[in-house]
Image: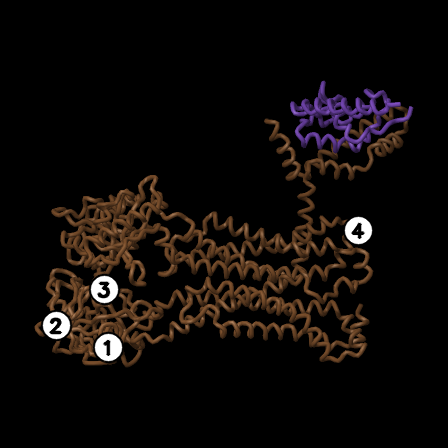
Amino acid sequence: MSGFFRPLRVRLHALFRRGAVDRELEEELQHHLELETERNLTRGMSAEEARNRAQRDLGNALGHREAAWEAYGWSWLEQLGQDIRYGVRVLARNPAFSIVTILILGIGIGATTTMFAAIHGILIRPLPYRNPDRLVALGERNTDARSARSGMSAGAFAAVAERTRTLDDVAAYRPWGFDLSGTESPERVHGARASGNLFSLLGVRPLVGRTLTSDDGLPETPKVVLLSEELWRRRFGSAPRIAGASILLSGERYVVVGVLRRGFALPEADLWVPLTFAPYELDQRGDRSLSVIGRLKDGVNLDAVQSEMKTIGHALERDYPKSNSGWSVTTRSLREEITGTARMPLGLFFAAALGVLLVACANATNLFLARSAARRREMALCAALGASSFRLTRRLATESFLIVAAAGVLGLWLAVAGSIALAHLDLTWLPRNAEIRAEPAVFAFGIAIALVTAVGLTVLPARDAARLNVGATIRVDALQSTVRGRISTRDVPVIAQIAVALLLLVGGGLLLRSFVQAESVDLGFSPHRVLSISISLSGPQYSNPKRIAAFFEELRTSSAALPGVHASALGSHPPLSGAMLSADFLPQDSSIGPSGPPMAHLVSVTPGYFETMGIPVRKGRAFQERDRADRAPVVLIDETLARRFWPRGDAVGRRLRLGATIGADSSWREIVGVVGSVRSIRPERDPEPTLYVAHAQNPWPTMDLLIRTTGDPEQLRKAVIAAVRALDPQQPITNVRSLDEVVARTLAPRRIQMLLILGSAAVVFLLAVVSVYGMMAYTLAQRTRELGIRVALGATRNELIRYCLRQGLARVGAGVLAGSAAAVAAGGFLRSLLFGIAPWDPITFASAVLLLGSVALLACYLPAARAARADPLTALRLE
Amino acid sequence: MAKTEILQGTLDMIVLRLLRSEPANGWELTRAIQTASRGVLDVNYGSLYPALRRLEAKGWLHAWWQPSDNNRRARYYQLTAAGRKRLEVERAEWERFSTAMRLILEVD
């Protein structure tokens, strides 16, 4: 055996077989004793004398046993065991204290660790593609408008792919809905058209078969499709020989080439088909709906790509001023593109969770401090009996570590549950949330947080123990050691708690007011009691637009006849549905400006749409039955668009021409009416200029049936689905929901943010108030004698209460000041999450200060009143 | 002749030195110390056994049970290679220490 392991083995043997070691020593000593006795006998002693002499020479056997045991170097462990047993006994004696502290800390640790799991899974962990740091996302941006980045047009994508010298490869995709029909009930699936090289560019491998390649989708080749693992398992029973099978998508046959592993999310889809461009499509530069991804060449950095894209953008502007004037090509890292929006809310949540943990720590520290003060005499006694101050500190530390260990277990358990919940919730506003996992790094973080917490909990009580004045404490609970009027380090926990509570109250208040503002904003339509159903027509029988128009016309008639229906209509892109279509247009008597033709949202609607949606007609008329395909084409505009182009209010009767986006329709249309504007993208966003065309004149294959009901819209659900099925059982129905639900969905991120921050604020507020109360009660209890003397000297009860309150309020005031300063500093950080309210909103600030201040005042008053009621004589006799 | 208590810290060295030539049990070691020092050094038997444990835990000794000369079971100790090295170190240190002591004490 090597020289290193032998001692270890000996020591471990001693540790785990202490009985055997003791027995061995016993036997060894016995052996010595016997031989020594024999020797003494040979020296002529009597048997008894020989034996006694040998015993005496050997000395205290028990002492030798202790000394021998210490030789193995395990005494520290033994003492630790003693401390732990002692700590467990102390904690078990105060179960309420222990449980409350463990719960508070556990929640703090759990919340912080969960948020770390989210940050780690979303922001820190690399994207699940090959060399993800080398991936960039490209887009186009209108340099004139304040509009956000948009996708790329096919023409711009082709130009970039052809001209780039800094990117190895460029691929594009766009989401595309498909109707999956065949054996079972038809289903609308989220699909995507993706250029074949997307998969090799990202470096993803298929689960079954192969991915798409650049050769797919070429003319004369069969139509192919790549399935997602999820769809493959759900729809095809994980059939291992799926590759080569043929499926029916939107009425056309496709051959399955493979299955893609779960976790691919560019875009998140059920299936992918090749994206190819007809020559005329490559000349389209106005429809910017492609998502484009590139991979940097080796040795090229993002700046180089950005400057190259600028050059390409300028060239496009020069060559195609009509469509590209004022547009540039922008680049940013793919990580930024995907997770950029998550940074702000995640940072906020993490800060809130940290606040909860901080306050939980402060609270626990307070409890420990109060308790260690109560145990002063006990500690002093131990010190007097010879315990070193190190040993006393260690004992305190052991207690806080025990508490934190339990809290840590609870917290990690909460974090695991929280991570699973976050990963499985359908959170559209939180990208990559499915990738959140309770992984080793998360556990390491949780344990580290727990350790820091444990050390933090020990510092103040240990300092107290180290300053212990043994003699004075044992003699009397010396008055001078406990009286405190001025703010000291012992007050830091309470002040910090109040500050954090105020900070979170202000933050939560701002988010609450923003939410209320967003919820009560005038949407421009009335979502109450409206049921919405998406129907998508596909297949050869609907290749003729007239058939599409006829189908939806019939559906409108049959649904209007259902009992309980007040009004019904169809629209291609209703507000807040997530779907939108942009079209360029040109009013009569104006020419295309330097930044291209104006753009507006385009919605194709049936008669009755504005009545059903509750959108007012401001001027002229809405669509009517007479606006048929064979009549002169008409258009409606909304107020936003009317104000921009006909500010004098004379829009009705004017004419405009639609661009190429909706068919090759460029005939002049008469504006027959002006309708109210609606907030179509988000409730918080101002209405976009919108054009409405008559569905009979411009049919669209995917429509939402909207039904305004007289009662609860949910009750009509079945009847409406049956009405659609009666017309054509093969066509898939999706998104059956009330418009109230649709509105609530768009506000869901805001609601969650608000609830999380308000929840943290509530927890912290509660803890802070409890702390204030505890601090007051404790301080006053320590000063019973002083108060008694004051009363004896003639202080009135009110004077006494005022005197006590002053002590408490000084600390509350310090906390409120610090918290206000922090809230002002954090205001700018919050700004992007607020709506309709300034980050320094005085009403919110005042309410938060008032709420916290008044409750804290009450928490100070109650113990003060009780202390002041005390009989001075009792108080004086108490000591 | 007056007996001398063993100096603190030197017991380890003495035990290592005595075990250099052959293994021995505890009782033999106490006898050997007295014999080798011609009765001048008096070992506190009690401190010998913990010392043996300490040396064993440090890996300098190896211990096992075997019958002793008088057919009783006794715990025998033997120097390990590490123990041998340690003895050299202790011995060198002791030489330096005693030389220094002599120099100091012989100064006029």
Q: Label 1 amino acid?
A: Val
Give the spatial CA distance, label 4 vs label 1: 90 Å
Looking at the picture, how far across and down is residue A94, in whole percent? 66, 62
Vertical placement of A824 versus B27: above or below?
below
Lower sequence index among marks 4 and 1: 4
* Residue bearing mark 2: A633
Neighbor class of circle 1 (other Cα within 10 Å; few <14, some 14-19, many 20+) is many
Q: Disc 3 on helix, strand or loop?
A: strand
Vertical placement of B83 versus A17: above or below?
above
Judged left or right of residue A846, residue A19 is right
Give the spatial CA distance, label 4 vs label 2: 102 Å
Judged left or right of residue A508, residue A653 is left
Looking at this view, name the residue that lies furthest to the top.
Answer: B21
Q: Label 3 amino acid?
A: Ser
* Residue bearing mark 1: A675
Looking at the rendered structure, the number of numbered marks drawn on it comes to 4
Q: Disc 2 on helix, strand or loop?
A: loop
Mark in the foreground, 4 or 2: 2
Vertical placement of A753 versus B77: above or below?
below
